[in-house]
Image (spheres, rainbow, N blue to C red):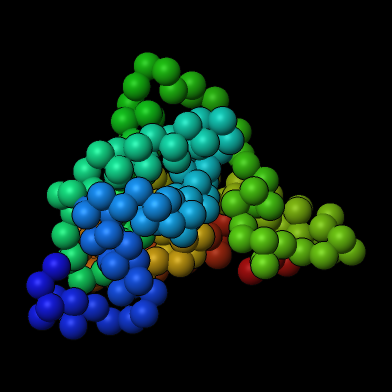
Amino acid sequence: MPDDIADAIPDDDTAEGWALVRAAQDGDTQAFGQLFDRYHDTVFRFVLFRLGDRPAAEDLTQETFVRAYRRIASVSYQGRDIGAWFVTIARNLVLDHVKSSRYRLESSHAEVADVAPATLRPGPENEVIAGATHAELLRCVAKLGEDQQECIALRFLQGLSVAETAEIMGRNEGAVKALQHRAVRRLAQLLPEGLR
């Protein structure tokens, strides 16, 4: 990567991720292993949230990294964290999976404990209440349109920025902000009074 582009990388995490990409492009398989370790949970949570099927999510997460490994030489810095590239690959695999004849129409919902980072999981005394709350939230999110579900997953579950979400969804930032606003407003209507 040219120095002027490297200077434009905004933060240490992003810079570190792109340094690992450069090393992997130079043939350092351990660097790609570090990228895998760094982004595996993010990709897995995204896929699990979209599919609600743990075995399929595990398979598609692995396929995401296989494809990324094959294409690592062609990726170049585009102003955001490399994690957005991994999520974009995962998103395309999820879309292909949903379109394929192997996809079953019945949907199962993952427990939020599978989706939420470990630091956000409730203590034992609150598990029953939190589980019911999260189950209701997932039920309401499932009533949103596909685009709204994806926007909510990327923005709030994955914690991606508006710009990163826009790139992954193939939209401009204004459209993502509007989509997010409509999705949150619709969720507020769908949630029971005590959970708003």
Name, please, the residue furthest toward the top.
101
Quadrant of the rendered image containing residue 171: bottom left
The residue at 76%/60% (across/down) is: 130
User: Dividing the image into 4 quarters, which one contains the C terminus?
Assistant: bottom right
Q: In the picture, residue 125 is in which quadrant?
A: bottom right
Q: Answer left or right for 46 relative to 75.
A: right
- Tell whether 36 sits left or right of 20: right
Report the side of 170 relative to 60 (left or right).
left
Rendered location of residue 159, percent (x, y):
45, 67
Name the residue nearer the viewer: 152 or 35. Answer: 35
Q: Is 91 placed above or below 125 here?
A: above
* Image position, residue 6 (x, y; %): 18, 77
Depicted 104 relative to depicted 34: above or below: above
Residue 156 visible to an observer of this rendering = yes
Instruction: Tell me residue 113's x, y (percent).
Output: 68, 52
Tell me the residue at 35%/48% (across/down).
29
- Tell me the residue at 46%/59% (across/down): 38
Q: Position of residue 55 (x, y in %)?
A: 56, 30
Q: Residue at x 50, y 46 (%)?
A: 44
Name the residue furthest right: 125
Is residue 191 in view from this perspective? no
So how many labels did they put on this image?
Answer: 0
Residue situated in front as seen by the camera: 59 or 110: 59
Q: State the image quarter where residue 161 is shown.
A: bottom left
